[in-house]
Image: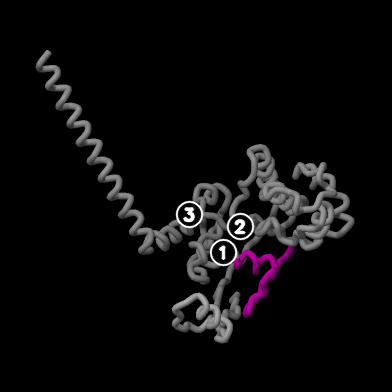
Amino acid sequence: MTLQVPHFIQGERPTKTFASTLLSAVVSRPRREYRKILSNITFQAKEGDRIALMGRNGAGKTTLLRMLSGAFKPTTGYVEVAGTVQALLNLGLGFHQDATVRENAFVRAAAMGMSTRDVGLHMADILHFAGLEHAVNHRLSTLSSGQRMRLGFAISTTVQHDIMLMDEWFGAGDAEFVEKARERMVDRVTGSKIVVLASHSFQMLRRICNLGMVIEAGEMIYFGPIGTAIDEYKNIYQSTPEYIARRKFEAENVSLVTKHIVTRDEAASGRGGAGDGSG
C-alpha cells in the first residue's frame, strides 16, 4: 500500500512587519505538491495475530491505522479485510456540541456501522458504562472533557468486533473508570481475532503482541516476531542525534551528581575522623 496526499506550501517572502506578513499571505499563492505519507506497506495478519505498531512520532502509525480502518484509501495497492473492524483512534469522532448525549450516541454508533436498532438495544449499557444516565438529554457542550471521553469509549467498545485497531492503550480518566475501561479493553482484545496496537510501551507490547511492525518515515522497516521488532525500533531511535544528545546530557548529569556525593561523603568522613581523634 502507498498513500500520497496533496500538500500546500506557502512561498517564502521577506517581511519586516506584521502588516507585510499578512499582505504576503493574502497575495502569494501556495503551490501544491504531492507527498508520500506511507509507501510500500505490505503485510498479512491472520486470526490470532496481535501486531505491535512501532515508530517515532510522525512516522505514519496513526495514518496506517486509519487506512486499515477504511478512513483513508490507499493511492496504490489495497486493503483486504475479512470481518468487522473496531477502531479506537479518536473517541470524539462524530460528536456534535449542540446535540444531546443520546443523539450523539446514535450518530457516533451509526458512523461505526451500527444499525439504529442495535444502538437502541445498547443505549442503556452505553449510558451506564459512561456514568451518564442522568445526562442523557443534556447537550454535549455541557459535559466535561472527561465525560465526553467516557461516552466515546463506551460507544466504541459496546460491541465486540473481529479486528481491533488501537492508537495507544486507553488509560485516561478517573481511577474508577480507568479500571472499568482496562477490564473491557482486555475483554475486547481477547475476543478479537486480530489486534493492531500502536504504542511506545515495550513491556505492554511484549505481553500482548506476537508480531511487530516498525515504521520509519512512512516506510515499513521490519515486520516479524515482537522481540526482534522491538530491537529494530531501538536501533532506529537510539541512533538519532536527539537521543544521543539526551543520553550524553543524562550521563554528564549523573557524573556531576556522583562526584558531588563522593566529595560530600569524603568531607563528612574527614570531619568524623577529626572528631574521633580529639575524643
Q: Is residue 179 left or right of residue 61?
A: right
Element at label 2:
strand
Mark 2 nearby-residue class (10 Å; few <14, some 14–19, many ≥20)? some
Q: Which mark is residue 227?
A: 3
Going 49% across and 70% down the picture, which residue do you hit? 217
Q: Is residue 102 left or right of residue 225?
A: right
Mark 1 nearby-residue class (10 Å; few <14, some 14–19, many ≥20)? many
Magenta range = 63-83
Residue at far right of view: 117
Report how far apart the C-alphas of labels 3 and 2 lie in the structure: 20 Å
Element at label 1:
helix
Figure quadrant of the C terminus: top left
Main secondary structure along the magenta-highlighted residues: loop
The earlier-in-sequence mark between 1 and 2 is 1
- Residue toward you, 68 or 154: 154
- The amino acid type found where label 3 is placed reads Gly
- Image coords of residue 221 (percent x, y): 48, 68
Q: Are marks 3 and 2 in contact (CB under 8 Å)?
A: no
Between disc 3 and disc 2, the foreground one is: 2
Q: Which mark is residue 182?
A: none
Mark 3 nearby-residue class (10 Å; few <14, some 14–19, many ≥20)? some
The earlier-in-sequence mark between 3 and 1 is 1
Going 60% across and 55% down the picture, which residue do you hit? 50
- Image coords of residue 22 (percent x, y): 55, 78
Element at label 3:
helix
Q: Which residue is denoted by mark 1 in the rendering?
A: 61
Q: Which residue is denoted by mark 2 in the rendering?
A: 167
- The amino acid type found where label 1 is placed reads Lys
- The amino acid type found where label 2 is placed reads Asp
To which quarter of the image does residue 72 belong? bottom right
Between disc 3 and disc 1, the foreground one is: 1
To which quarter of the image does residue 135 belong? top right
